[in-house]
Every structure is written in C-alpha cells, then in structure tokens.
Image (tube, rainbow, N blue to C red):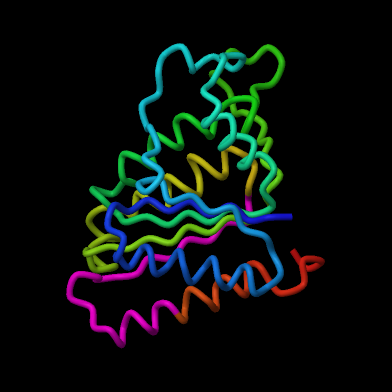
Amino acid sequence: MYILIILAHPEKGSFNHAIAKTAKESIQSNGYKVIFHDLYAERFDPILPYTEIPRDAKIDPVIGKHCNELSQAQGIVIVHPNWWGQPPAILKGWIDRVIRAGVAYKFLEGDLGEGVPAGLLKAEKALVFNTSNTPDKREQEVFGDPLETLWKNCIFGLCGLKNFKRKNYGVVVNSTPEEREKWLEDVKQIVDYIFPKSPDDF
C-alpha cells in the first residue's frame, strides 16, 4: 500500500515544498509507503504528442511508470499553486499524459468518447493542497473557485474517486512565519484524518 504525492512548484524553497514535505512525513509516520514526484525537479515533460493519445498507444517508459504508480496507488496527494485559476503547465501536462484512458478511466462498450466514463483508479481518497495570493472571498465571488471544479468534478470524479478533499492556503505573499506554521499544522491534521495511522481504517 502506498500513497502517491505529486508536487508542482518551480521554487525549491516554496511553501508548496513545505506542504509536500509535511504531508509526506505525516503519511510515512502513519505507516504508509510514499511515492513522491517533484515534477519540476524531475524535469517532467508535459507535452502530449498526438501519437500518445490513443488508448493502445506506445508510450514513453517514464510516462508508463507514472501511469502504473497512479493506477496502483491507494491514495493520491497533489500540491500546487493556483496560477490563473489553473495548475502550473507542468502539472496540466502530467494530467494530460498520465490520467489517461485505460489507466484512470475507460469508456463503456459502444461509447466513442461522448459519454460518462467508468473510473479505474484503485485510490479511495485524494487530497489537493493549493496556495494562492487571492483572498478566499474574492476567489469564490469573482472566480467561482475553478480549481475545486477541476479536481473534484472534472478529474477525480470522472475517474471514480469520490472521497476528495481540497484545501487552499493564502494569502501567501504577505503571510507571516507564524501563519505558515499554523497552515503546516493544519496540513498535518488533514493528512492524519484522511490517512490515519492504521491502514485498516483507510
């Protein structure tokens, strides 16, 4: 049993890195194995070639490894900043190339791609941690919180994963060290609740 953690932030000293580190350590201390990917550090290639789109396409071994890890994970944690109401491009590319047909979902017989697919992920729980420089009230009232819709409905919901939680921290740009410490403690508490110490409770 392992939990897959995907981090997407270009700055090594970022608060996103602190979140990912806290989540990883908490998950490990609760008795789970962790597979961790820092997409920027690994220089993940986000460009989806046309030849890779078909379900039975021959895919790059690195992408194949990511696909296998995703399909077998018992839980998923994603950490990224809110950039224009979207994940960074490198993470969007990971979504395009890894959360693919035959790995995360499948279309039912007779469905050419126009219907609602069946989810294939083994993971029962997913966490998404975001950072933002937009106050929550403005995010909700002006933008409608597009990241919630993206991760909950468009991605994990489509792949059959219903037990989903997302938490945003901000405003980061003018936050104090004390605020960040409180946020990291909150990350730990959320992780401990979603992935408790006994794997039997998962």
Q: Is residue 126 above or below residue 96?
A: below
The residue that appears at 57% across and 70% down in the rendered structure is 191
Q: Is residue 145 left or right of residue 75?
A: left
- Residue 101 in the magenta stretch? The answer is no
Residue 62 position, x and y percent, is 52, 31
Q: Is 170 or 66 nearer to us in this picture?
A: 66
**Quarter that holds the N terminus:** bottom right
- Residue 173 in the magenta stretch? The answer is yes
Q: Is residue 44 above or below residue 173?
A: above
The residue that appears at 59% across and 25% down in the rendered structure is 101
Q: Which residues are magenta?
A: 162-184
Q: Is residue 16 left or right of residue 117?
A: left
Q: Is residue 26 above or below residue 99?
A: below
**Quarter that holds the C terminus:** bottom right
Q: Is residue 132 above or below residue 101?
A: below
Q: Which quadrant of the figure has residue 88? A: top left
Q: Is residue 198 left or right of residue 95?
A: right
Residue 143 position, x and y percent, is 26, 53
In this view, the residue farthest toward the right is 200
Number of numbered discs present? 0
Q: Is 123 or 164 nearer to us in this picture?
A: 123
The residue that appears at 32% across and 68% down in the rendered structure is 15
Residue 162 position, x and y percent, is 63, 51
The residue that appears at 50% across and 49% down in the rendered structure is 152
Residue 167 position, x and y percent, is 44, 65
In this view, the residue farthest toward the bottom is 178
